[in-house]
Amino acid sequence: MSNVFTLLVAREARLLFRRPAELANPLVFFAIVIALFPLAVGPESQLLQTLSPGLIWVAALLAVLLSLDGMFRSDFEDGSLEQWVLSSHPLALLVLAKVLAHWLFSGLALVLLAPLLALMLGLPGHCIPVLLMTLLLGTPVLSLLGAVGAALTVGLKRGGLLLALLILPLYIPVLILGSGALQASLQGLPVVGYLLWMASLAALAVTLTPFATAAGLAISVGE
Amino acid sequence: MQGKNLPPRIFSPAPSPKVSLSLNSPLLEAVALACERDWRMLFERLELRLAAGEMLQISGPNGSGKTSLLRLLAGLMQPTAGDVLLNGQPLAKQRAELARNLLWIGHAAGIKGLLTAEENLIWLCALHQPASRDAIWQALEQVGLRGFEDVPCHTLSAGQQRRVALARLYLAAPPLWILDEPFTALDKAGVAQLERHLAQHCENGGMVVLTTHHTLANTPDGYRELDLGQQQP
Amino acid sequence: MNWTWFHKWGSPKWFYQISGRWLPWLSAAAVLLIATGVVWGLAFAPPDYQQGNSFRIIYIHVPAAMLAQSCYVLLAVAGLVGLVWKMKIADVALQSAAPIGAWMTAIALLTGAIWGKPTWGSWWVWDARLTSMLILLFLYFGVIALGNAISNRDSAAKACAVLALVGVVNIPIIKYSVEWWNTLHQGATFKITERPAMPAEMWLPLLLMVLGFYCFFGAVLLMRMRLEVLKREARASWVKEEVAKQIEQGGVR
Amino acid sequence: MSFASFSEFLAMGHHGLYVWTAYGISLAVLALNVALPLLSRRRYLQEEARRLRRESQK
């Protein structure tokens, strides 16, 4: 069983590396959105620093959302999902492997790119570890929750916008906790409470969402 | 008298001596099956039984519900009414049992264009029935893909890609095969070879349910045809 | 006896007959309770010593907000029943209840905003309760949009059920995180609902209104569900008879 | 009765506009919620009646 898990992660990795553009697109999107904000609100560094926690998190949220639309689409179109559903392995396990692979290669890149953009927005250096920690705990939740929406909309012609509608409200706790932690660290307040909450959200998402995603995939395949 | 009302059924099969066998212990059964798509009833009160050694060809015009019926039988879709039974038990309650018995190749066969033929098969085997690397190479050779094992599938022709999917039939395979249009894109030799292989699988006690538009030249004893076009209420 | 068959085809008819008997009583109770509550709340309840007469808006706001929240729970429960026991009537309930819940959320938001103008001095304040309500409205929109986007109605019902279940697990998390966010940012000090020790002549009309709104919800839900059952079971003979009878009685042409 | 006169009741102590719009909009929405299913039921029955007539003519 764990064999299938590792095989699937490896297979997804192979697929992503053979089409690297799909990996790069959300990252470029992330950078562009961050660059748009100073242009919109003005280059004043004090203002940007105050806004930066929120800006980074909103941009990260949108970038993850953008990468999610295609998560199951090619698997749906080429019939792979039918094979998953009919396999004797639990669908939730396959889903978890898929999301893990997706996060490892798109979410993690986002986490690594974020400090650079944060420094450009004027976030002081002592906040960078907190930024990394919150993104490390938060982006998996975004991927896992987004997978539920992606599974439910995979069979629809124009699922992308609908996916955003379904999933963005569910992202709100992560957004609040993530940017809240950053703001706290900006003001020199303790952040451990936030991080613990985010960790428990991540644990909850890892245990529950794969089942919802699996149910969603079975519904979309059975349509 | 009858000729006036009913069109003559040219391809209706002669009653086979093995019919009694199918009454004994059908592996797969459909009871009063109905399928509705987009407010249109495709078929209703459909009954069928499939036991060891039988091959069922489902025919009918486009949109008559051939693929839907296959998907119902494979448990991918839920029927509007009626039940699909596996060994006499409802399908929905025995996913693991179904996975052991069923090999499904849909219209889209689950082959990734970015992966090589070998990588594709290794994954599909890991997902369903484990197979060794040697066995996979042998199967690829049998479907005439020797030398194409490590070429990305999107560079192969449509017929060759279909052959990659069909190579699963040459590996240690479960008894029940459900194939949606397996002959699509195959050349003449490929069609003949696949027909022989399917017939042989049935002679060995396997079961095949398939849809295809062409008339099979090589059929096993337990061959039957189900015409969904004539099944309309 | 095959019980799946019983569930699939047996329940709708039973539901249709029973609900036909309940509907008049529920409607009458809703009209009576809401009318009494409105008159009592508007004319007889004493004004609030801090907010004056604008507090009378809570007689609409609070019942609508309560209903909006419990309606989402109902969606999730119906979804669970539909997914686990394959009860078709639960699918119908899920998809019929979602628009009503969205309307109730809209009422709660609107009345909250109108109440906010004289109390806070602006139409919209990012108060924890109102913000949660806004998010709840988005969640309702998601369920409705997903249900409309999927053409196969069985799949649509199942997909909505999964979404509602994910949503209902999320709602407490959203609620607490929004409350936390609100206390961190020192939002509005007035809360529309938190008030110490309301006298009986203030909360009795509120109780009537809450009950009235629930009856109203039940009646509208039954109306929607009965129509949906007629549409879905159009092939069944009892539905054909019922539709013919309704056409004759209503003089529909 | 917490108001001395009808005009005071309408004025709601300077908050009349807010109170009455809130109640007005809410009752309108409630009425809409009742009307929508009734209308769609009527439309459905009309469709069915037309279909039945079409079929009986055949």
Image (spheres, coloured by chain):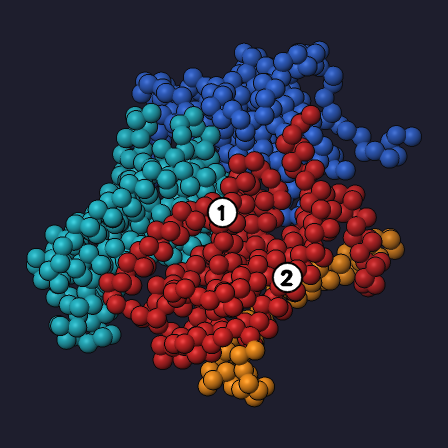
Task: State whether residue A18 appears in this view.
Answer: no
The answer to whether tags 2 and 1 share a subunit is yes
Residue nearest the viewer, comparing B59 with C32: C32
The color chain A is rendered in: cyan
Tell me if mark 1 has few (under 14), some (14-19) or many (20+) residues whose alpha carbon lies within 10 angstroms of its own. many
Q: Where the C terminus of chain B falls, by quadrant?
A: top right
Give the image quarter of residue C176.
bottom left
Q: The residue under label 1 is which amino acid type? A: Ala
- Identify the element where label 1 is drawn: helix
Say which chain is orange. Answer: D
Q: Which residue is drawn at 53% across and 36% down?
A: C84
Colour displayed for chain C in the image of the structure = red
Foreground: disc 2 or disc 1: 2
Residue B119, image x, y percentages: 32, 30
Mark closer to the chain start, 2 or 1 = 2
Residue B70 drawn above or below residue A55: above
Q: Residue at x 87, y 31 (%)?
A: B3
- The amino acid type, in three-letter code, at marker 2 is Ala
Residue ID for mark 1: C76
